[in-house]
Image: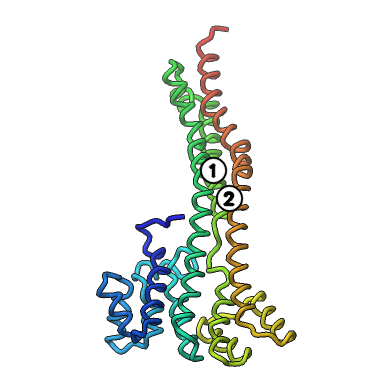
């Protein structure tokens, strides 16, 4: 599916892919970044400027994102700034002597899959989340409807003890419903990080010809983190079976991205049914308290005994 054009982070896979093409054509790494910068790529321009000041290339790449995007955190979501991951992959590839263009192509695929999976989930969440927000205003609509029908609902809510109780309880239920809905949507949103990144990094390191233990140590040093359990299991399988680890790792990374996409769609599908809970527990009682109860109280107050 098409990514949002106004999302700077979504353009990172395209920049990485163009960079891989330039490198494969024989362009020197620093010059390749300059070519992209001259073509109007703002992130590449920041890299080229940093390299011109003497900053190592992999560090310049890791800091390529705009400052405001970097302050939001690199792991907030798959759509967040991925340049630190690109810088780590670049550092791993140059350290072990892996084919840089091929390594960047694989990373571009991983980044694109992560963005597309996040977009899939975002689109799937849009309808139930929008419906929940719309229904959340139903109690206030009922209040306005009662007033438009001639019932003195506002005075009843503000001027009588029973009305004040209904107002306080209804307002509390509306706030609880909005917070509950927001929590459910956040829980269904794609978690942070790029699926399969650890295996992808290890594949880059192993393709340089180093041992598996050395590859794992280089990846840990470049990323500042550990190796996830799935990638570690692939390394163990490679040692036990005596088969090359590169293809196993890339297959594991692709499988992790596929599972993340499916899991995201399932969470989005389950959200529709889970949003019925705050609707039944909070929104409908608030509708009764702010819409129906004031009308009944207004009728009772004007009806002679």
Residue 20 in the image, given as x and y percentages of width and height? 41, 77
- Inspect this view and state whether residue 77 appears: no
Residue at disc 2, secondary structure: helix
Q: Is residue 273 left or right of residue 181?
A: right
Vertical placement of residue 173 versus 89, above or below: above
Please state, as top left, top right, bottom left or bottom right, where the C terminus lies in the image.
Answer: top right
Query: Residue lying furthest right in this view?
Result: 240
Query: Residue lying furthest front in this view?
Result: 25
Q: For mark 2, what is the residue?
A: 268
Label 1 and label 2: CA atoms lie apart by 8 Å
First of labels 1, 2 by sequence position:
1
Residue 115 in the image, given as x and y percentages of width and height? 48, 62
| Label of residue 226 in the image | none
Residue at disc 1, secondary structure: helix
Residue 45 in the image, given as x and y percentages of width and height? 28, 75
The residue drawn where x is 43% and y is 55% is 2
Q: For mark 1, what is the residue?
A: 128
Q: Which of the two residues, 251 or 216, is positioned nearer the viewer here? A: 251
Vertical placement of residue 154 versus 200, above or below: above
Q: Which of the two residues, 195 or 305, is positioned nearer the viewer here? A: 195
Residue 209 falls in image quadrant: bottom right
The residue drawn where x is 59% and y is 92% is 214
Q: Which of the two residues, 44 or 69, is positioned nearer the viewer here? A: 44
Residue 272 in the image, given as x and y percentages of width and height? 60, 43
Q: Are marks 1 and 2 in contact (CB under 8 Å)?
A: yes
């Amino acid at each position: 599916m098409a990514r949002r054009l106004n999302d700077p982070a979504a353009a990172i896979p395209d920049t990485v892919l163009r960079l891989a093409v330039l490198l494969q054509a024989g362009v020197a790494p620093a010059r390749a970044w300059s070519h992209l910068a001259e073509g109007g790529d703002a992130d590449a321009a920041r890299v080229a400027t940093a390299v011109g000041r003497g900053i190592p290339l992999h560090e310049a790449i890791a800091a390529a994102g705009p400052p405001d995007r970097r302050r939001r955190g690199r792991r907030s979501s798959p759509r967040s700034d991925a340049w630190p991951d690109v810088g780590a992959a670049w550092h791993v590839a140059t350290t072990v002597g892996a084919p840089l263009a091929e390594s960047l192509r694989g990373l571009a695929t991983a980044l694109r899959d992560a963005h597309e999976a996040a977009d899939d989930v975002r689109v799937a969440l849009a309808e139930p989340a929008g419906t929940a927000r719309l229904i959340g205003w139903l109690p206030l609509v009922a209040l306005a409807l009662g007033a438009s029908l001639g019932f003195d609902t506002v005075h009843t809510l503000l001027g009588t003890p029973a009305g004040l109780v209904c107002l306080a309880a209804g307002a509390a239920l509306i706030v609880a419903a909005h917070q509950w809905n927001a929590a459910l949507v956040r829980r269904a949103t794609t978690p942070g990080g790029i699926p399969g990144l650890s295996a992808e990094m290890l594949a880059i390191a192993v393709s340089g010809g180093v041992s598996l233990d050395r590859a794992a140590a280089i990846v840990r040093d470049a990323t500042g983190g550990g190796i996830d359990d799935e990638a570690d299991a692939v390394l163990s399988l490679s040692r036990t079976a005596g088969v090359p680890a590169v293809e196993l790792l890339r297959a594991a990374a692709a499988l992790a991205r596929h599972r993340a996409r499916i899991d995201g769609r399932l969470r989005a599908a389950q959200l529709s049914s889970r949003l019925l809970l705050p609707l039944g527990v909070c929104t409908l009682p608030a509708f009764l308290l702010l819409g129906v109860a004031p009308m009944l109280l207004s009728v009772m107050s004007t009806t002679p005994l």
